[in-house]
Amino acid sequence: MKELFSTYIDEIWHLPLLIGFIFLMTIIVASLTSRVFNALIQRNKEAEDHGDVTSLIFFKRSVVVLTYIAGLSFAMYMIPPLRIIGGSLLAGAGLLAVAVGFASQAALSNVIGGLFIVLFKPYKISDRIQVRTDLSGVVEDINLRHTVIRNFENKRIIIPNSVISNEVLVNSNYEDNKICKWIDMGISYDSDVDKAKAIMKEEVLKHPLFIDNRTEEEKEAGEEIVPVRVIMMGESSVNLRAWSWAEDPPSAFLMGCDLLESIKKRFDAEGIEIPFPHRTLVYKNPKPDSAEDIL
């Protein structure tokens, strides 16, 4: 009896130390893992490799979470009462597994969706994307549960990974950052079309953010550097479009705003009219009811 009591006392003293040691090692391993990943992430940010940054951030969080889960599980296993409770619940493990499976279905689908996003890279951190027709912005973060998009009003859009991984989206930075910006202008039917096209081309060419996107083969073949075409004969205007290229979406947006203003000023200065919509109203006389009305 004395030996049994002595053994029990030893276990009581050793168990808290052992559990404390397990938690300490778990925290140290998670911290070291996080530091290693942070160093790799910083190195890739300096190299502007956003694809690797996205993968590293996602895997860092996955490894840290798994480290804490493993440490907590091992600590619980070292406590005899919890081990006994686990054994007694073994008979109902099948039912418990089904219940946990249904409860965690959404969470697991988000984790799997995030893993697919990181592996197949339909988008990455710092990409400009549009989801559906009303959600657009810059990808700010991809974690185990959701993707964070910062829109152009500096608001955050939180989309679960399981949802966005099944959406059709537009990625302005996928493979190539260059953007073709359409510059559309309408002129009156009385205006000189050739002169208007020349003005639009000149304004595009002298803009500092414009780039020549032609290949060497297209240059040798004499392809136009800034095509300007008549794209529609509208109700009250002849609609023209110029194709202008920029290095990235932000540059394309600024260039588009500047060109609309500069072309408008050139049109005003050189007599190219930008018309207002016109309507022609026709008044018809009422049909006469009798011969007296005719007279």
Image (cartoon, rainbow, N blue to C red):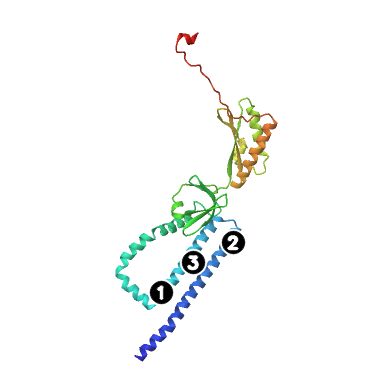
Residue 275 located left or right of residue 295: right
Q: Secondary structure at mark 2?
A: helix
Outermost residue, left direction? 91
Residue 51's disc is: none
Mark toward the start of the polypeptide (3 vs 2): 2
Report the amino acid beneath label 2.
Answer: Arg
Closer to the camera: disc 3 or disc 2?
Answer: 3
Q: Secondary structure at mark 3?
A: helix
Label 1 CA crowd tier, 10 Å (few <14, some 14–19, many 20+): some
Residue 76's disc is: 1
Inter-mark Cα distance, 1 to 3: 18 Å
Vertical placement of 176 versus 110: above or below?
Answer: above
According to the image, label 3 marks what residue? 64
Which is more toward the observer, 51 or 28?
28
According to the image, label 2 marks what residue? 43
Report the amino acid beneath label 3.
Answer: Val
Q: Looking at the picture, how far across and down is residue 82, in whole percent? A: 37, 75
Which part of the image, by quadrant, shows the N terminus? bottom left
The answer to whether marks 1 and 3 mark residues whose Cβ atoms lie closer than 8 Å is no
Q: Secondary structure at mark 1?
A: helix
Which residue is found at the position 45% from the left and 10% from the top?
Answer: 290
Mark toward the start of the polypeptide (1 vs 3): 3
Vertical placement of 172 versus 46: above or below?
Answer: above
Which is more toward the observer, 250 or 148?
148
